[in-house]
Image (cartoon, grey):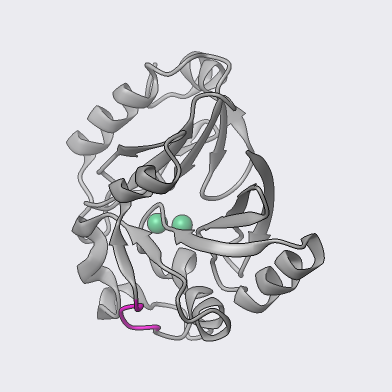
Amino acid sequence: MERLTIAVGSYEVNCSILSKEGKAYIVDPGQEGERIIGLLAKKGLEPAAILLTHAHFDHITGIAALQKAFPELPVYVHSADRKMFGHPFNQMPSEYASIGTPANLREADDISLELPELKVLHTPGHTPGGICYYLSEDKLLLSGDTLFARSIGRTDFPGGSMPEMLASLKKLMELPRDTIVIPGHGMFTTIGDEQDGNPYVM
Ligand SMILES: [Zn+2]
Ligand SMILES: [Zn+2]
């Protein structure tokens, strides 16, 4: 698949647009739905779905503009994160409006019906329904807020768990070393670099 990644919103979420045969799959549309719509138009891509790594406010608020422009657009999310939509704990800074529960929610695992090459790895710890998207052919992992370059996501938010996080990281460290990792925030890395240099997995 083709991939394009932009940092969106004041928390600089890495939003990746995966595309194949003119269809775009938007991972974590952050706060800048309008900008993403413009980018899709420029590239001649038609949005096929929104994929969420988890439902924290900084990863999801762009859904509102995307679904306003494309009302049928489905949103794939793990069921364990559904209760976070519109939850008071999940709308901290005032510049992020609450979007409530989006329409057309689908279970994350079901994206494989449409994109068999995309594997959904359940990696709880940062949130109960945290997932990573793995494209083995492209050697690419979109790790959300589970794994960062030399760091990991926080486990002290509601629903977070350090034991679950450590088990999730162990699972990710079994992927091939040359897998490129695009985290939910910050610099890209590889599984090998994290095996060697991330204090939480060494
Ligand atoms: Zn998060
Ligand atoms: Zn985040």
Residue 186: image x %, image y %?
A: 61, 46
User: What residue is rendered at 66% in x and 78% in y?
Assistant: 34
Relative to 115, 3 lies left or right: right
Magenta stretch: includes residue 137:
no
Quarter where residue 182 is shown: top right
157 over 134 or under it: above or below:
below
State which quarter of the image contains the N terminus.
Answer: top right
User: What residue is rendered at 41% in x and 70% in y?
Assistant: 57
Front one among 39 and 181: 39
Front one among 131 and 70: 70
Please count the marks in the image: 0
Farthest residue, direction right: 42
Q: Main secondary structure of the magenta part?
A: loop
Q: Which residues are magenta?
A: 99-103
Residue 171: image x %, image y %?
A: 31, 24
Relative to 155, 42 lies left or right: right
87 over 129 or under it: above or below:
below
Front one among 142 and 148: 142
Residue 119: image x %, image y %?
A: 39, 35
Quarter where residue 166 is shown: top left
State which quarter of the image contains the C terminus.
Answer: top left
User: What residue is rendered at 52% in x and 30% in y?
Assistant: 150
Residue 161: image x %, image y %?
A: 20, 45
Q: Quadrant of ligand 1?
A: bottom left
User: What residue is rendered at 53% in x and 15% in y?
Assistant: 192
